[in-house]
């Protein structure tokens, strides 16, 4: 068997086309969708991610504002800026690029963002909503994976899903979203003993560990769907995922490449969440004016 390669770039193009139409409609109704992106310090990887997000927003007509702070900015200053953005009607989404310098509390930052503008879906309120199964803004990377599966008509109901990686931004929300869709989900992490005994049972294997070459063909069930979230920069400058793509491709039924798989969808779902936020604001405004 040779797996079908799920083309995240192509799907992202289609979804961004739909986003452009939604953005145009909002603008015509007098509501220009806006995203504020805060970045602290000069971590090169963060800069690349932020620039990608800003460029993608501009392409579809979402106004993005990049707010850059030096690495030694005080926590107080960042929190004050977030509070100002929370009440700025031109801003429908607020994103703080992680990681942050150690002296700034990620928890405080995420909890200061209004949950109504938390388009990354990391606020306690949004995480709680996800647990209850009625997410306000689904976190962008798992949301992107969900769209990739849907685009191929892969029904997760009743499937054995194994998620490798249990971070707050990828693994845990991914597992919750799949469980909500009635998959049987197992989560593995760095302390899991004998990872292969879990992965081999997966009908759908989602890998987000940040370890190149972690998943080799012997660990994959024949015909499994393999989603590789990992992004690893190798010493030669190339980017690879967590899965031995060439080996596993010969065994899986579907596989996502790195780059060109999950990555483009993550950025796309950020735009989708920002548009969703702006549409909610517009709708709420219409509702209020219909009452008055
Ligand atoms: P993280 O470091 O916060 O979490 C990694 C998780 O993997 C942890 O739960 C850890 O226990 C687990 N893990 C580590 N080594 C393992 C091993 N040998 N076996 C099993 N589990 C192991 O990372 P993260 O932020 O969740 O990101 C994970 C990967 O996904 C990274 O490569 C990151 O760059 C990538 N990523 C990609 C996108 C995208 O859009 N494609 C978005 C976010 C993160």
Image: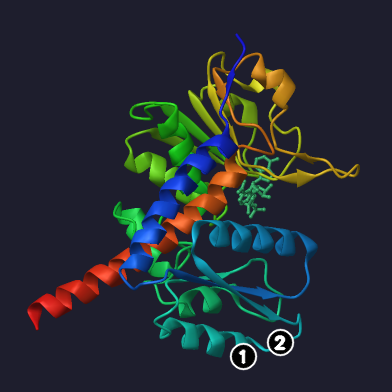
Q: Is residue 68 left or right of residue 23?
A: right
Farthest right residue in view: 236
60 or 66, nearer to the observer: 60
Q: Are marks 1 and 2 in contact (CB under 8 Å)?
A: yes
Residue 151 location, x and y as percent?
Answer: 43, 32
Report the residue marked by disc 1.
77
- Residue 211 against residue 149 in the figure, above or below: below
Residue that label 2 marks: 73
Cα distance, mark 1 to mark 2?
A: 7 Å
Q: Residue at x 43, y 52 (%)?
A: 19
Give the quadrant of residue 49. bottom right
| Residue 176: numbered disc | none
The local secondary structure at tag 1 comes to helix
- Quadrant, the C terminus: bottom left
Give residue 217's position: percent from left, percent from top: 68, 19
Vertical comparison of 239 with 30: above or below? above
122 or 4, which is in the foreground?
Answer: 4
Mark 2 Cα-neighbour bin, 10 Å: few <14, some 14–19, many ≥20: some
- Residue closest to the eye, 281 or 217: 281
Whether residue 35 can be seen here: yes
Q: Residues within 10 Å of mark 1 (few under 14, many from 20)?
A: few
- Residue 215 image position (x, y, % from top left): 68, 29
Q: Quadrant of the N terminus?
A: top right
Q: Secondary structure at mark 2?
A: loop
Can the viewer see residue 170 in this picture? no
């Amino acid at each position: 068997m040779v797996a079908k390669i799920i083309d995240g770039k192509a799907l992202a193009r289609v979804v961004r086309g739909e986003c452009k139409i939604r953005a145009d409609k909002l603008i015509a109704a007098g509501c220009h969708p806006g995203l504020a992106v805060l970045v602290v310090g000069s971590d090169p990887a963060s800069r690349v991610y932020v620039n990608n997000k800003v460029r993608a927003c501009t392409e579809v007509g979402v106004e993005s504002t990049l707010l850059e702070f030096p690495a030694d900015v005080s926590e107080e200053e960042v929190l004050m800026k977030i509070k100002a953005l929370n009440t700025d009607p031109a801003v429908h989404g607020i994103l703080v690029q992680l990681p942050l310098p150690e002296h700034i509390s990620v928890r405080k930052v995420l909890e200061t963002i209004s949950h109504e503008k938390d388009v990354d879906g990391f606020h306690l309120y949004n995480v709680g909503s996800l647990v209850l199964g009625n997410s306000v803004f689904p976190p962008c990377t798992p949301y992107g994976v969900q769209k990739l599966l849907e685009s191929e008509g892969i029904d997760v109901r009743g499937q054995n899903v194994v998620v490798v990686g249990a971070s707050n931004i990828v693994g845990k929300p991914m597992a919750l979203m799949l469980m909500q869709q009635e998959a049987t989900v197992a989560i593995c992490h760095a302390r899991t003993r004998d990872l292969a005994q879990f992965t081999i049972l997966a009908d759908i294997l989602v890998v987000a560990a940040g370890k190149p070459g972690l998943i080799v063909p012997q660990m994959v069930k024949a015909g499994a769907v393999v989603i590789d979230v990992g992004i690893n920069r190798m010493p030669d400058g190339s980017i690879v995922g967590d899965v031995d793509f060439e080996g596993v491709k010969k065994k899986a039924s579907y596989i996502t490449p790195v780059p060109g798989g999950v990555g483009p969808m993550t950025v796309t779902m950020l735009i989708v969440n920002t548009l969703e936020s702006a549409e909610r604001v517009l709708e709420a405004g219409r509702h209020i004016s219909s009452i008055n």
